[in-house]
Amino acid sequence: MKIHIRNGRLIDPGTGMDAILDVFVVSGKILAVGEPPAAFQPDNIIEADGLVVCPGLVDMSVRLREPGLEYMATLESEMNAAVAGGVTSFACPPDTDPPLDEPGLVEMLKHRAKNLNQAHVYPVGALTQGLLGEHLTEMAELRDAGCVVFGQPDGMIANLRILMQAMQYASTFGFSVWLSPQDMNLAHEGVAHDGEVATRLGLPVIPVCAETIAISNIILLAKVVDVHIHLCRISSAEGLAMVRAAKQQGLSITCDVSINHLHLSDMDIDYFDANCHIIPPLRNISDRNALRNALWDGTIDAICSDHAPVDEDAKLLPFGQAETGATGVELLLPLTLKYGMEMKRPLVEVLAVITNKPAAVLGIDAGHLTPGASADLCIFDPETYWKVTAGALLSQGKNTPFMGMEVPGKVRYTLINGNIVYQS
């Protein structure tokens, strides 16, 4: 199909472009930007007056819950949610049931996702068998099956010798290693930040040193092994300082932050809101402010939704017993826009941390509007506010601490490979 997107505010963070321009799409690719190609006759015209046209969003953590956890969400429901949020590419963590530690599981996930013909799914392969931290997976075979990086979600490998061997294996093949910087011994059975709120509520805590000790070990090993390290969901000012120093020393290290941690703090759990029970825990206000500022000095490379739909009954339990996680793939764009407004940053900079920058960390060709690139586009109305309600979310999981909030930015169209896969 030939598509003419007319009079939109075209923003391409990779080049810094921000102008009223037309986009011309042919055979799933961006044919031209600006002037129409010769003899171009569109099959479809999208009127984008007052709308922003940008690369499709790239989310670094979207849990699909398949295979094995379909009672929480299904592949179809979460793919629908992704495109409704303007997300055209995302990484899927390996903590399914069973974990993504076998090539057959990865191939099945990729095949099913491709048949839905929606967002591009990039599986994160399990770093160790069963995610138990004891034996390495066959990373080369998992890469051939479709994994783009390898990780150990929601906690460090306790045995540092195994972690070092995993880094060495990954380094041999040029693979990136994604790690959640949390020492599981220090975080054991904790559910909240070690501060006044947790003390008053009587909740078991996860101290900041659970993060910083893990980061310290990771950095020390990465200095020995020449491997790219990505830290998932950093949460503290002290952790940021360590990452900043490592980058200044020339270490190959990147990190991301959850959109939840840019807006919320431990104060938000004050009424035992189980929707705020997430890992890593929401830290204090000073940590939150440090995270907000670290996106602009280059310490944090990208924002992710950390999308984790859970069964409704699992969130009705007392705070400490409730399932961790929050749904968020449909909220990545509006909450990032809200954050950008509050920080008074240009829209081109704001969109960069959810388009081309996470694409660079993932190592995929996405997040830009270069002619010849795949026509993966998000077209949204930046002036329209909408209310977060269970009915407004397509995700099977309705567990979000932002329920009832008015947020800016309504996705009008999502295009993937030149096909309109979502239209509001």
Image (spheres, grey):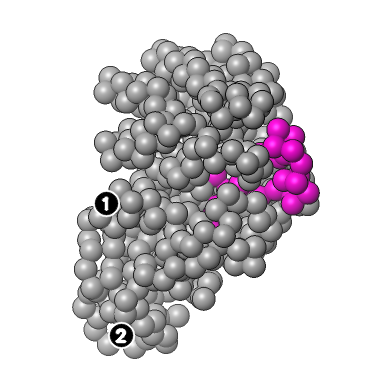
User: Residue 132: x percent and y percent?
Assistant: 69, 24
Quarter of the view holding residue 404: bottom right
Which of the pair 211/41 is nearer the observer? Answer: 211
Magenta run includes residue 322: yes
Which of the pair 236/353 is nearer the observer? Answer: 236
Q: Give the range drawn in magenta.
A: 306-330
Which of the image's four quarters has the N terminus?
A: bottom left
- Residue for point 66% across, 27% down: 203
Question: At label 1, which amino acid type do we have?
Answer: Arg
- State whether the magenta stretch is mostly helix, strand or loop: loop
Question: At label 2, which amino acid type do we have?
Answer: Phe
Q: Mark 1 points at which residue?
A: 345
- Residue for point 60% across, 63% down: 389
Rendered view: 71 above or below 195: below
Of mark 2 and mark 1, the one earlier in the sequence is 2
User: Residue 147: x percent and y percent?
Assistant: 56, 41
SS category of the residue bearing label 2: loop
Q: Mark 2 points at which residue?
A: 40
